[in-house]
Amino acid sequence: MEKKHTFLRKQAKWEDLYFYQKSVTLYQLSFIFAHRYYANNDRTRDQLIQAARSGKQNIVEGSADGVTSMELEVKLLNVARSSIKEAREDFEDYLTAHQLAKWTPGHPRYDGLLQFCRKHNKWEEYESLVNKWNDEEMANVGLTLCHMIDKMMTTYQNKLEEEFVTEGGIKERMTAARLGYRTNQKDEIARLQEELDQLKKENDMLKSTGRNT
């Protein structure tokens, strides 16, 4: 069977990426938080929502565009990371402005929060708790998600970098696919020529045997 040579990368299923699932949760959490704790005329409300949404959307767009362009995928993932960092800054500013605690190592609730956010990715696992959390709790959950998403995306981008070094970009993959196809064609022609030569030999032998009898 002829080997199939392709140059398009396999599209990542972004729905299965844990950092994407967490980004959806961050967006939903940010939307509720912003509407609950910011005034309607506070520009930060819309900025926080847009930053969280941009993070989520650019992960999707980057994964889709990565089929043909790893460079574009990396750029869009960088945009997503920048947006997530912007959301993180908004949560930190809120805690500071309202003199609320930022749960860092040593805080009595830090370890529990960390374990919860590590274990749970999807919004459905947070949704029932949102109405029970106050602003300090929600902001710290948002902060933790931002840190985790950024760290996970960094690891993912490092893997993309390794893939690019070993496999190259779209032009290199197209060239490799074309060369592979041409090599297959040459091998197939050589095989057919060999079969033809063998058939000619067998035919000559049959003719020689017929004359001798």
Image (cartoon, rainbow, N blue to C red):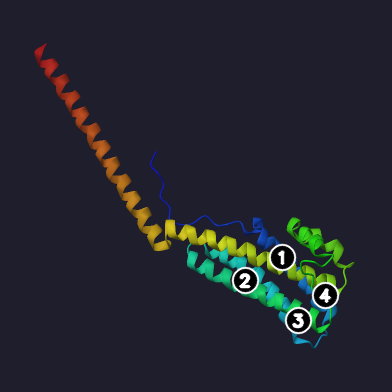
Q: Residues within 10 Å of mark 3 (few under 14, many from 20)?
A: few
Considering the numbered disc 3 on the image, is that residue within a helix, a strand or a loop? Answer: helix
Camera-side residue of 185 and 18: 18
What's the residue type where badge 1 is placed? Answer: Val
Q: Is residue 125 left or right of residue 194?
A: right
Considering the numbered disc 2 on the image, is that residue within a helix, a strand or a loop? Answer: helix
Disc 1 versus disc 4: distance between alpha carbons? 25 Å
Camera-side residue of 80 and 111: 111
From the image, state whether disc 4 or disc 2 is nearer to you. Answer: 4
* Residue drawn at 53 percent across, 58 percent down: 159
Disc 1 versus disc 3: distance between alpha carbons? 22 Å
- Residue under label 1, please give it: 24
N-term mark: 1 or 3: 1
Q: Residue furthest front?
A: 106
What's the residue type where badge 3 is placed? Answer: Asp
* Residue drawn at 71 percent across, 63 percent down: 22
Disc 3 versus disc 2: distance between alpha carbons? 18 Å
Camera-side residue of 177 and 109: 109
Q: In which quadrant of the rendered image does the N terminus lie?
A: top left
Disc 2 versus disc 1: distance between alpha carbons? 14 Å
Considering the numbered disc 1 on the image, is that residue within a helix, a strand or a loop? Answer: helix
Q: Position of residue 57 (x, y in %)?
A: 64, 69
N-term mark: 4 or 2: 2
| Tag 3 near tag 2, CB within 8 Å | no
